[in-house]
Every structure is written in C-alpha cells, then in structure tokens.
Amino acid sequence: MANGLWGRTVSALVVGVLLSVAAAMPSLAQSIKVTVNGTPITDLQISQRVKLFALEGNKGGTKGATEQLIDEAIQLSEAKRLGVSISNAQIDDAFLQIARNLKMSSDNLRALLQQRGINIDSLKDRLRAAIAWNAVTETAIMPQVQISELDLDQKAANQIKDYQGYDYILKEIIFVGQGSSGRSGQANQYRQAFAGCDAAVDLSLKYTDAAVIDVGRRNATQLPEPIAKELAGLNVGGITKPRVVENGVSMLAVCEKTQAEDLTFIKSDLRAEAGNDALSGKATSYMDDLRKRAKIIYN
C-alpha cells in the first residue's frame, strides 16, 4: 500500500512538473513584440530577420527588421482583402530564382541559410509578402497610373538632338572577310564610285565578296551615335566612311532621308521611365495610407 501510494504521488508530481514546463515553453521560446491587424510578430521572427539582414549586408538591425515585418504583415493583409492568394509553388520558384542569381543550387542556398542560423521560413515569408505586394500593385495600384502623352511629346522634343531628327531608308554595303586593310581599300574604291542606291548592287558585282543588304527604315535614335551624326551630314545618295565590323568592312548608303515626325523611339524610353516613377510614387502613397489605417500594437 505504501509503495503504491508513493508511486502514485511521484507520478502525479512528474505529470504536474511536465504540464507546468509545457505551459511555460511558448513564453520561453518566443514572445509577441508587435501585433499588426491581429497578426502577431514574435521576437523569434525579428531575430531571424536580423540574421537575414546580416547575410545580405543590411545594417537595419532589430528596428529595421521589425519595421520590415510590420510592412509585410500589412501587405499580406491587403492582398488577402483583395482576394490575392500565393501558392507554395510560387514561393519555391522565387526561392529557386534567388539561388540561380547567386549561382548556386537551392540545396546550397538552404545550407548557407542553415550555417548562418537562419530558418528557411524567414526568407520564404519575405518572398510571400513580396509576391503578394506585386499582385496588389498590378491589381490596385497600376490602374491608377496615368501618363500624359502631351508631356511625353514635349519631353521627347526637348531631348532629341539635331542629328537624331531624321528617318532614313538605308542599304548596307559590306565587304566580307578578314584583312581589314585590304577590305577597307576596296570599300573606299566602292565609295568613290558609288552613284546612288539604285546602282548599289550592280557596282558591288565588280568586287570580290561584296554584298548589299537592305537595312530598311531606321530612325536616327536607333543607330549608334557616331553613325547617326555622320548620316545627318549626308544627303540622299551619300554613303558613310568604311567601318571595320565583326565580319568585314561596312558602309551605309542613304536611299531616303526625311525629317522625323514620329518620336516613338524616344517616347518609349520616356514612357517606361515615367511609368516606373509614377508607379513607385503611387505604391509608396498606397502603402503609407495602409500603414496609417493599420492597427499596430507594440508590446
């Protein structure tokens, strides 16, 4: 009887100790530092993000890691509100792309993270938020971006240089083969005898390994600056000086030359630049507004 009672007492004490330890474990393992729209951010998440920062050379420290996690929680919350869902396959693809950018396998990237004491979920959580925010940007922010075509026209007109204001129809005369000095000599002879595009092919038949290629219509902005400058000084029927290229010696003949009215080539670059700037500004404003309306509780 005594032994049975003693055994039950010991068992009860052991169970009690185990239960009390189990109850204490969550608070010992991690504690909630911030709550964002009901989503907790723990000290473990923050410390993991700090380690990830260190691996990347980011000196944001604990404060920077905390703020980034807050932003990500807000971004994921907004994505959820808009019905955006991110699959594990998307996360895995993004992880693999990072590994490829670092010129390593995904297994080696996992090993690198492990060596630095970084849980792979810390990186994957950030990837999830980034992919979700890209989706929010495309869904809710990009439609708000408007670019004035009039502004683009004015900027393009201001940026274009005198030698870029032409459209051409060109033919390339190329003397194919090694030995640039010999080829250049023949090219110069051809140039001196050149009497216009209509006779370009017939003239080329007098030379060995000479070819005439229809380049077609080109705007000056599509051409290398030195060539565009030289062409600007030529009239229809003119031909550029010989230039050594990869497969021989090349010249360009001017078959037509008109003042350019279409600034598409300059506007396309300006549109991309303006669009990126406008989108970045809209995204920042959108995020600032979300953050102002978010319920952020620091513990």
Image (cartoon, rainbow, N blue to C red):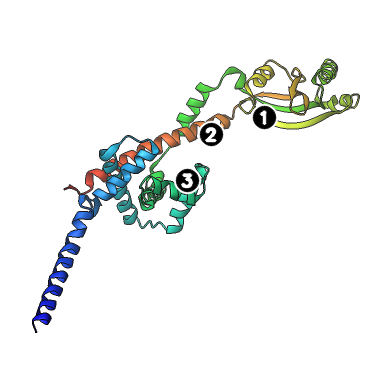
Mark nearer the N terminus (3 vs 1): 3
Q: Is residue 211 left or right of residue 33?
A: right
Q: Residue 18, image x and y in percent?
A: 18, 67
Do callouts 3 and 2 mark residues in contact (Cβ within 8 Å)? no
Q: Report, in whole angstroms, how far the alpha carbon at label 3 lies from the one at label 2.
A: 30 Å
Question: Residue type at mark 2?
Answer: Ser
Residue appearing at x 51%, y 26% in the figure: 156
The residue carrying pointer 1 sits among few (fewer than 14), some (14 to 19) or many (20 or more) residues within 10 Å by Cα, namely some
Name which quarter of the figure residue 61 lies in. top left
Residue 70 relative to residue 217: left or right: left
Identify which amino acid the numbered label 1 is placed on.
Arg
Quadrant of the image for the N terminus? bottom left
Using the image, tell me which numbered label, if any, was put on residue 298.
Answer: none
Placement of 127 over or under 192, stated as above or below:
below
The residue lying toward the viewer, choosing from 192 and 55, is: 55
Q: Are marks 3 and 1 in contact (CB under 8 Å)?
A: no
Between residue 70 and residue 299, name the one nearer to us. 299
Badge nearest the viewer, 3 or 2: 3
First in sequence: mark 1 or mark 2? 1
Query: In the rendered image, is residue 38 in sight?
Result: no
Name the amino acid, label 3.
Answer: Ile
Instruction: Check disc 2: other Cα within 10 Å, few if <14, some if 14-19, many if 20+.
Output: few
Q: Where is residue 294 shown, x and y percent of the image?
A: 23, 48
As drawn, the label of residue 98 is 3
Location of mark 2 (residue)? 268
Residue designated by label 1:
218
For discs 3 and 1, the disc positioned in front in the rendered view = 3
**Residue 104 appears anywhere in the view:** yes
Label 1, secondary structure: give it: strand
- 100 left or right of 54 in image: right
The percent position of residue 210, horizontal first and vertical second, equals 85, 27
The kind of secondary structure element at disc 2 is helix
